[in-house]
Image (spheres, rainbow, N blue to C red):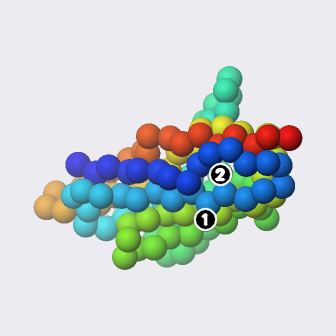
Amino acid sequence: QVQLVESGGGLVQAGGSLRLSCVASGNIFIINAMAWYRQAPGKQRELLAALTGDGTTNYADSVKGRFTISRDNAKNTVYLQMNSLNPEDTAVYYCNMEVVERRTYVSTNYWGQGIQVTVSS
């Protein structure tokens, strides 16, 4: 089993910045893709940013140029640097990792528990 724990959320004023972190622990052999999603009230969960094992990044148009995804493989951690935040960014943010587990070498998709980000106007 693998656990993902997010941190760094909270309340910020419009125009401000936050940095989210997500640490994976447990039965990890290697982590392939990492990603961040968010879900606002009454809306579907949306993919914000993805980072593959070879370093390729993809961003949703809504966050391109403002958000940056990065990873620290040694720490099994993915980050999301969020700049120029606006009230429309208010949502619960989730990390997602594609983890190959030790012994089984099976790839499984794991989610964090979600963390609230609130941007005030």
Whether pointer 2 and pointer 1 mark residues with C-beta atoms closer than 8 Å, the reply is yes
User: Front-most of 37 and 11?
Assistant: 11
Instruction: Check disc 1 and give the amino acid type.
Output: Ile
Q: Is residue 1 visible?
A: yes
Instruction: Check disc 2 and give the amino acid type.
Output: Leu
| Residue at 30% over, 58% down | 25
Q: Mark number for residue 48?
A: 2
* Image quarter (top left, top right, bottom left or bottom right) of the C terminus: top right
| Residue at 67% over, 57% down | 18
Left or right: 28 in relation to 104: right
- Count of numbered badges drawn on the protein: 2
Left or right: 117 in relation to 66: left
How many residues crowd mark 1 within 10 Å: few (<14), some (14–19), many (20+)?
many
Q: Mark number for residue 20?
A: none
Q: Mark number for residue 69?
A: 1
In the image, residue 21 lies at what x, y percent? Answer: 51, 59
Residue furthest toward the top?
A: 42
How many residues crowd mark 2 within 10 Å: few (<14), some (14–19), many (20+)?
many
| Residue at 83% over, 49% down | 14
In the image, residue 99 lies at what x, y percent? Answer: 34, 58
